[in-house]
Amino acid sequence: MNERQSGVSEPQGESQGGPQGERLGERQGEPQAPSRRYPRTFGGLIGSMIVLVAAVVGYYVIQNVLHDEPDGKPVAVDYLSTVRDIQGGGYTVAYPATLPKGWLATDANFTPGDRPAWGLPLLTDSGTFAGIQQEDLSVEDMLATALPNGARKGEDVTIDSKVATTWTSWSDGQRDHAFSTSVGKDTLLVYGSASVADLKTLIGLLTTAPVA
């Protein structure tokens, strides 16, 4: 009877205990050397961060050296050129032909269309605000924006102006005042925290004539 017919299996000890098995056992049991991959990756990340921070700091320093810091002072705009363009489009707006000494216009806003809107914010020589707003809206709607703390109607006053002579006075009962009149179908409002005297001075400079 041969070995296959006897059913006796061949011992497995030699295949597991041979030289190859010993080498496998040694590899499985021996301690693994610590990997240097992660320390190298972490060090590279730190180096990249240092370079990035240095670049940002360098850029900031260069920008501050080459460019002057803004002093925070408002910049005057050439509102008369804007008015000239508006008039060239066929619109009539009220504007001051000149400004008192020390006053400046900080912006000039115009929205054309069927219901155009014109706005001119100003600063007086004392730094208070005076605004001109002209729109095809009711005076109540415009006062809701110009005097958000509430508008109390005052007396009608006469102010010598090329736009209108009769103006309705308004106040919020605190510091803001306004004067309203009509220019064609539009409501014209002169308002702000500037003194009543300054607002009246501005009204006296208003005109709708073509810009010289």
Image (cartoon, helix red, strand yellow):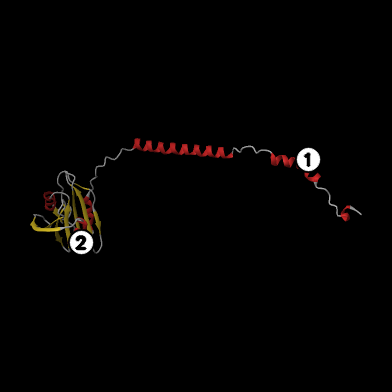
Q: Quadrant of the N terminus?
A: bottom right
Label 1 is placed on what type of residue? Answer: Pro
Please tell me whether residue 95 is drawn above or below residue 67 in the rendered image.
below
Q: Is residue 44 visible?
A: yes
Front residue of 79/73: it is 73
How busy is the neighbourhood of tag 2: few (under 14 within 10 Å), some, or many (20 plus)? few
Residue under the image location 49 percent in, 39 percent down: 48
Residue 170 position by quadrant: bottom left
Position of residue 36 measured from the top left corner of the image (x, y, whole percent): 59, 37
Tag 1 residue? 19
Position of residue 114 measured from the top left corner of the image (x, y, whole percent): 24, 64
Frontmost of labels 1 and 2 is 1
Label 2 is placed on what type of residue? Answer: Asp
- Residue 55 lies left or right of residue 191; in this view the side is right
Position of residue 64 measured from the top left corner of the image (x, y, whole percent): 35, 37
Q: Earlier in the sequence, mark 1 or mark 2?
A: 1
Q: Which mark is residue 45?
A: none
Residue under the image location 78 percent in, 43 percent down: 17
Residue 155 position by quadrant: bottom left
Residue 14 position by quadrant: top right
Front residue of 184/136: it is 136
For label 2, the SS is helix
Please tell me whether residue 109 is drawn above or below residue 74 in the rendered image.
below
Q: How many angstroms separate mark 1 from mark 2 (CA)?
A: 99 Å
Tag 2 residue? 141
